[in-house]
Amino acid sequence: MTDDRNEALAAAVAADPRYVALVTQRARLGWRLSAVIFFAFVGYLLLIAFDKDLLGTPIGGGVTSWGIPIGLGLILLAIALTGAYVAFANRYHDAQMAALLKDHGA
Amino acid sequence: MRARFVALTAASFMLLPASAMASAIEGQTQRQPTNWVAIAMFVAFVGLTLFITKAAAARTRTASDFYTAGGGISGFQNGLAMAGDYMSAASFLGISAQIFNDGYDGLIYSTGFLVGWPILLFLMAERLRNLGRFTFADVASYRFAQPPVRSFAAVSTLLVVSFYLIAQMVGAGQLIKLLFGLPYAVAVVIVGGLMMLYVLFGGMRATTWVQIIKAVLLLGGATFMALMVLAQMGFSLEALFVRAVEVKTQAALAGGATAAEAAERGRSIMAPGNFIKDPVSAISFGLALMLGTAGLPHILMRFFTVPDAKEARKSVLWATGWIGYFYILTFIIGFGAIVLVGTQPTYLDDAGTLRGGGNMAAIHLAHAIGGNAFLGFISAVAFATILAVVAGLTLSAASAVSHDLYATVLKHGNASSADELRVSRLTTLALGALAVLLGLLFEKQNVAFMVSLAFALAASGNFPVLILSLLWSGCTTRGAAWGGTIGLLTAFVLTLLSPAVWTNTFNMGPAIFPYSSAAIFSVPAGFIAIWLISLLDRSPRAAIDKEGYPAQRVRAETGIGAFAASDH
């Protein structure tokens, strides 16, 4: 495809309200998920900074402390959120975007 | 004192900041008897990777081959390679050693090193792939005047890579002396030489495969260790923790503590310890790790090796999955070492500390689990790990010089692919020689702060420039180039004035900047400087920059006009 055709296509796509809606939707999801992982991690650090004993409290009558599931949970949360975003973006978002580009003759 | 510094350097060599590691790492780096099994396994690894390099060399003909392996790497492969690029020997040996000593604190590091990946994905992954071609500067400078923004990006890349590389080279020399019984200088020359061969002849294709093989070996070895530990505990984490607390309590009792004190000390491994002293340092350090990950040039470069945005996202998912899994394994390995290594007199010296130095916990555990053969395997994997990381770093620095400085700034984009390739290779040679030289020069220095510095620089310079150029239409050339520079300088100066460098490295007395990481100040400094300078920028160029935003945005979101994979 030539640069001119790309430029015309990009301009047409940019003016399409469906494009605007799609892009807004994904951007919103990206920011929300970023906020979740950001505040989860910062919250974890603050918890450690201000209340070390809380994370050291044993679960039930055992030895394992609350800090273990919380720390490992943060690792799993990072993986789960990445998975959720990729599933949304690669399956739903990309399909919608491809259909939209096709309508504009890409 | 000097011996102590060497020990510290060796032990906390790569990813872990000095202040926090100091408590975890004690003891000497004694040269070990020559380990022939380890050497044989390592020679096998080198043979295989050199064979791959030879095959890759035949297919490395253009600049695109050299920088991005032609853009044809799959998301799964790239995810493994990213993990291989990111999981250093320090993550493995350093974090497991820290858990061996203090228990829980090691987990705090692990989470910090992981949480940057989701953010990189959510805010940048597809935009990077859609706008860029070879380096992150392609993205950062997309709608701007090329020379200022490219120059900033190249300087930033060279700084980040240099500090990271020095830490890796010094760490490599110490580690190999430790594991293989080779002299320091020989070890540094071997690492530098092999890394040069991979990058020089095989470019991104060979580097990618070295990183993939290393990731598979490291993940496989660590999985085996964690499984063997768990098998001895009836696959119960609770049982593992119970035993570990017992071992620590017994050790405290043997050390002359009262029963109550000993019980307290045993329990302490299940709770956060000394890692976080004040909230400001904690948040600051967390910010540097989280946002720095999203600004590391050698990681960002890997986004251009996949064919499209879809594969770029998959890469991050695989990378996050593998790295997260690896940190969980490291956690089990650290606790396993408390139980299986900490109780065996053969692994301890007369004072009750680990033979060979504090970093040896995982290595001794390998021996406790699988004897000499597995010890050799894990040692060879640690060596391979360092090679993969330094190859990735060198490749990204070479690209910054040849693609950003030479081809774009100096030749205004008119350099031929062959010329660019030639400059890349010359730069690789120069960097290899420089890395060896710096490795030798810094042998006796405490370089542990250099990796946290690299992360702080990436978080304060590259990250704000990328985010604002991608997401804010008002960002201008001047804002990006100067604001980014201000972010970098703030991080650099504050780190020099911080306790890890001012007090512990330069012995200049109490630190002027009291916190362990600069990021909490330098990241906002970068953002605010870019914003303010852009806002005040009334130059004609600023108008062009702002006008260019809508076109950049469409391409970033849709991939219309993005560089496709080249096939041969």
Image (cartoon, grey):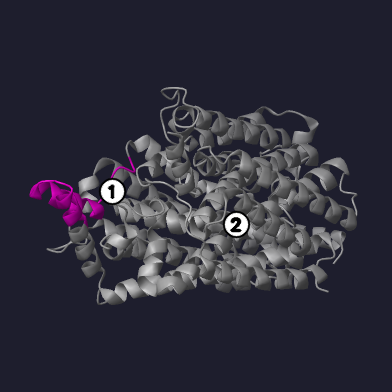
Binning the other alpha carbons within 10 Å of mark 1 as few (below 14), some (14 to 19) or many (20 upward) gives few
On the question of residue B537 being in view, the answer is yes
Determine which quarter of the picture holds residue B490.
top right
Residue B359 % position (x, y): 42, 53
Of the 4 image quadrants, the one containing the N terminus of chain B is: top left
In the image, taking residue B156 as reference, residue B294 lies left or right, namely left
Q: Position of residue B366 (x, y in %)?
A: 40, 68
Span of residues in magenta = B248-276
- Tag 1, which chain? B
Look at mark 1 in the image and give the residue it sits on. B351
Label drawn at residue B389: 2
Alpha carbons under labels 1 and 2: distance apart: 35 Å
Question: Height in image: B56 above or below B453?
Answer: below
- In the displayed structure, B287 sits above or below B483; it is below
Assign a secondary structure to mark 2.
helix
- Residue type at mark 2 is Val
Residue B422 vertical placement versus B143 (above, below): below
